[in-house]
Amino acid sequence: MEPRIKNGFLRAIIFLPMWFVSLALVMTLASILVMFSSGVDMADEKAIEALFDVSFDSPVMLILTAFQVMGSFLALWLATKFIDRKPLMSIGLSVKDKANEMLIGLGFALAFIGGLFLVLWLVGAINITGYVGFKPGVFIVSMMLFMAAFDEELIFRGYILNNMMDSTSNRWVALAGSSLLFALLHSGNPSVWSTWVPMTELFAAGFILGISYTFTKNLWFPTFFHFGWNFFQGLFGFEISGINVDSWKMISHENTGNVPDIVSGGAFGIEGSVITLSCTIICTYLIFKYYNELDK
């Protein structure tokens, strides 16, 4: 069946408020359930603030992230059924023969973040101060980060990029549109406006996460790469888009101050570095070249 709204860019824009409303409803319900199950007095503002003032390794954070994914699926189901008029699975959820893409995405993320750590250390941007060691909370963190990455890929690649691709034969135009929205979603993160690099890198990140999808229409490579990108950043002691990662970092380091913030990343972390931005652009091209060769 033909979509009710013909223009894919318009469908993507209309979807955003649907998603926000769905998230608001589901997350409100989730918050009430968490407060009720925790025995918190709902009239006590300080108790409520303490309950939700949590770190990445908190079970509360894990529960709330799970509900966030549910809210996204509700919005996606409504949009695909009543606007797009196609099955929900069409956004790229098939796992058949995708194990290799999952492993490659995770391995690529490790090589990417590990390589950046090494480069920043070699140029004197960071100074290693110690080895923190393994923290049991890493298991909860990994589950939470995977769901968070999956959630963003569902929305920005599975629906928004997918629909924009329906209205243009130029993959780069569709990627630019979805990447702009992806960057804007993170525009309120701590220190994101500290230099010109963080928002530029977030825009570029939409390309490296989405380029494989423009060939495969499948979410598993970008999901595992996205998860690995965030997880390994934290493991190596970098902030994730300006957010502290003390709950699971294994290597402790600090910026030396010997190079400008646009090289070290400053308070925003590795995603605020022009080295990361350059590597993101180069790797986007390499992924494009790989899938382009497969298509021939």
Image: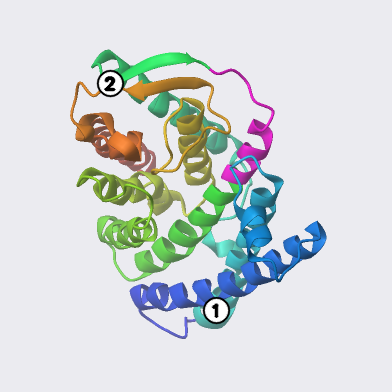
17 and 166: which is toward the camera = 17
215 and 261: which is toward the camera = 261
- Provide the secondary structure element on which disc 1 rests: loop
Q: Height in image: 194 above or below 3?
A: above
Asked whether residue 197 appears in the rendered view, the answer is yes
- Residue 114's x, y, as percent? 41, 22
- Magenta residues (range): 132-145
Q: Which residue is mark 2?
A: 256
Q: Is residue 140 magenta?
A: yes
Q: Height in image: 219 above or below 284?
A: below
- Residue 274's x, y, as percent? 22, 35
- Provide the secondary structure element on which disc 2 rests: loop
Q: Height in image: 276 above or below 188?
A: above
Q: Earlier in the sequence, mark 2 or mark 1?
A: 1
Disc 2 from disc 1: Cα separation: 54 Å
Specify the label residue 85 is tagged with: 1
- Residue 74's x, y, as percent? 62, 71
Asked whether residue 283 appears in the rendered view, the answer is no
Mark 2 neighbour density, 10 Å: few (under 14) some (14–19) many (20 or more): some
- State the residue at coordinates (34%, 40%): 268
Mark 1 neighbour density, 10 Å: few (under 14) some (14–19) many (20 or more): some
- Figure quadrant of the C terminus: top left
- Residue 6's x, y, as percent? 39, 82
